[in-house]
Image (cartoon, coloured by chain):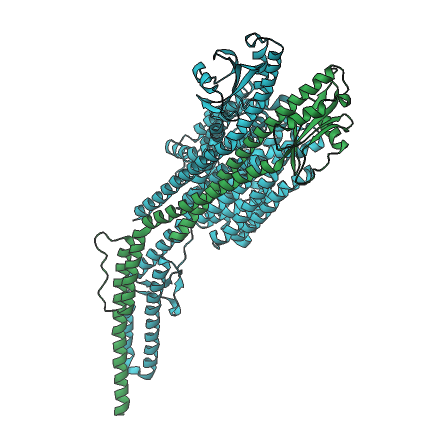
Chain colours: A cyan, B green
Amino acid sequence: MPELRQARFAGLFIMTLILIVAVLIGISFYAARAFERSLLPQLDRKMLTVGTAVNAKLERALRYGIPLERLPGVTDFFGGVLAANPDLAYLAVTSANGVVLYQRGTLLPSVEQLVTSTQPPVGPPTAQRVGAAYDLALPLQGGSTMTGALHIGADAGFVTRQIHELLFDIAIVFIIAALVALELLPLIVQQNLAAPMRRLESVLRRIADGDLRYTLPASHDEVGQLSSLINRLVTRLNTTYRQLIHQALLLRTAIPASVGRLDSGLASLRQGFILAPNGQPTPYSSIHLIGARMATFLFIFAAELSQPFMPLYIRTYAAALGDPPAQWLIGLPLTVFTLTAALCMPIAGWRFERVGSRHTFIEGAGLLMMGLAGTGLAFNFFDLLGWRALTAVGYAFLYTACQGYVVANSSEQHRAQGSALFVSGLMAGSICGPAIGGILADRIGYTATFSCAAALALGAGLAALNLLGASPVIRSNQRDQQPGHGLIRDLSANFRFAWLMLFAAIPAKLLLNGFLFFLVPLTLYELGNSRSEIGRVVMLYGLAALFLGPMFARLADRFAVHGLLIGVGGLLTGIGLVPMLFFPSTLTVLAGVLCLGIGQAMSISPQLALVTRICRPQITRFGSGPVLGFYRLVERLGGASGPLIVAGFAGLFGYPGTMTAIGVLGVVTAALFSIGFLIMGIDSEPSDQSAPPVTPEPF
Amino acid sequence: MYFKITAAIATLIAFVLSLAVLMNYAKFERAFSGLTESRLAFLVQDLRETLEFGLDLGLDPAAMANTTSILAREAAKDPQILSILVFDDQGQVLHRHQREALSRPLSELTPGWFRTALRTHPDAAPWRISDPDTLIVGATLTNNFGRAVGGIALRYDRSFHDHELAQALTGLTQAAGLILLAATLIALISAWLLFRSARRDLRRVRSALAGFLEDADSPAFQAGSSGSKLEIGYAAAEQNSREFWRRLRQVERILRLEQQLADQESTDA
């Protein structure tokens, strides 16, 4: 039966996707028609304006008595006009008998077609569809006779081209909508059907097993109506039982001789049944992690909305301090964000332990909202830094609240599943955010996009009221903990751990933050890409990580090739960036982002698994929480240094040169990591324990 | 339930449609404005070439007598052209053609405005500025020695332009609204079709349970061989409830008998 429910959900999802495609086709089709109606007359007017002016010049020459077929420099003149008016396809002059005398441009129709279009017009001259072009023919008067015709052409696909230029954006909207549907539909189905049905079945199963302690939350829908009846049944059985017990007690007091008979009757009555204490059944509750996934998706979506244009936005503020601004000034707010988020994680954890996930999330959403709105309205570079720091505090709170909620509400056996839910929400948000952010920034500007992000953060906070249940206080060993001095000393003495951090973990985060968040937007912008296009390229990283990450994690576990995958992933990331200096193009950046996505998907999960193996003595002594906490902290600090280091390189080598330089750095560190582990080996035997929940860090 | 699922899908489709409308409108706005501005820029460029021809002959821009008629001729090409001005490098208007019978007077462009326009656009390429009423397309006039001696400013009625844009946006929004309505209906029907068997199960179980609550001796619910998980679960729960109910009634009878016995004993006593 769960299969049936899954099939229903799959049906619903497919139906939604079909609807989205149909809707996008419908609106695009309408837009194409509407564009044609409005743009063609404008194109016509443009052709007429240009044609009239060109005609006047040609006729002036004819009036001086120069024969039409001997006008000098006409083709060059046409070239100049076409260069200044790229929406025109060609200019041509035909003689009175239809011979093409001069022509320039593309899409020129055949002579027969031109002759047909030169027929004297009944009214004012209008463009006609001739082959692949709209052609406007204007008569050339040499004195009182018509000596030829000037043809002005525009691409007939002008309107279609406008729609085609949108196709990439429309495709992105479809991908985003599909991802949002993948987040939203399970939540709705879960909350309104799957979870109530599961609760219903669970309580019925309990009744079948003789457990009469639970009632169900009643609602106004079909499930709620049945729940009410079940509650009536359970309440009636409990109440009747209590009444009989009460009656029996009275009889026992009144007739002591009946005690034996009554006791045996009552004992057999409740045999095999569990009744509610005091006859008051309690509501059956179950916690669902799907809400945490949606909450994660929403806040990551809000936080990542500005990612594809953040360095460009910072540059406008940094320019006030020096034009052109120093590269490190552009990198500084990115570093402040990552560093603040990393350092605030323990504070967020402390808050989470005290007030629970819902409150922490709502506080985080409030901070994120203020931070994002402030970033969009910043007065100068310095208050921009402050707003970025505030945004990072909110981010840390939200991240901790969601991660903590999943950890606190999933059993040991289902921890990995819970973690996967959290990660999928996180990755989906990091795909949708940049893509939509780029489109919005292009259309409505930076400040309005930040306002949208702030509104989304507010929405996430409001949603959390419903999505995140009151969770129990987290057990201290379930979360990344703060390392003590003993642990730091111990881990520093672990040479393999130090090697892994220096040549794999830190470079991976440095490249991610330095390349993806700093270099990609700036380089692509310099190469003439719009913010939508930057968003699309940045999105590829998330897509690769989302779809390939779980596959590589399974491969690493199955064949115990964690070290190999980390090495290959690092090499791939580095190699992907090297060609940029030699072939600086959008395609090279795109390839770099793709390599980064695949490389990181290969190495993130195996890194965590490797830490648990090479740090077995420290984990035994201090517990996995503090060890992983220290690993995370160092990794995040590496990430924080990324934008500043890369900005330093950019000041020296320019953006393409810097990409190559950090690519070489990536190759060298990955090679050193591989050589080091080939020599040292991995000390411990392959772990028989499953790896701890893998939660890739998005920054 | 169907309504909630449909509402979620409708929200998602509204989000998709609003993005699509936003993108299409922005594209239309760019294409439409681009076409209009490039046409006007061509007119201005043509004018600039004509006037610079006079400058090349050594004429003083203020003294070029036929300029006003040239401006009038160009303005006649498009009824939406409100005015064309020729100004010198100090921002003083030298020649002006203004359309008669304007619905409302045009805001005056100050000498400072002209000087700023010249300073910020020193090259020959046409420039475009917009104010609330007009689109302004201009070009800098340069003499033989490459010195900016003045400029041309053409003011174009925004109302037509804005009306076209508003019409496009309204059309797109209306189309999106209709598409959303149709999609919502389809979503509602699909959700109903997809989940009707679940609803049927719920109804059957609810009816059986209501019957059992009404009359505990009513026939027991039969899940059937292809029964759903809910039906099978309910059949087992009902069976156990009947059993407990039977025991309760048995104890109730015992209690009643004991009570009768006690009453009889007290009467005898």
Report the residue at 55% width, 37% height from top.
B164
Front position in the image: A379 or B40: B40
Which quarter of the figure has residue A638?
A: top right
**Residue B11 sits above or below residue A655 on the image:** below
Report the residue at 34% width, 66% height from top.
A234
Front position in the image: A479 or B28: B28
Report the residue at 58% width, 46% height from top.
A369
Total numbered labels placed on residues in the image: 0
Front position in the image: A147 or A509: A147
The residue most toward the bottom is: B269
Residue A667 x/y as whole percent: 52, 23
State which quarter of the image contains the C terminus of chain A: top right
Residue A136 x/y as whole percent: 51, 22
Q: Is residue A543 visible?
A: yes
The residue most toward the top is: A70
Which quarter of the figure has residue B129?
A: top right
Q: Can residue A545 be seen in this view?
A: no
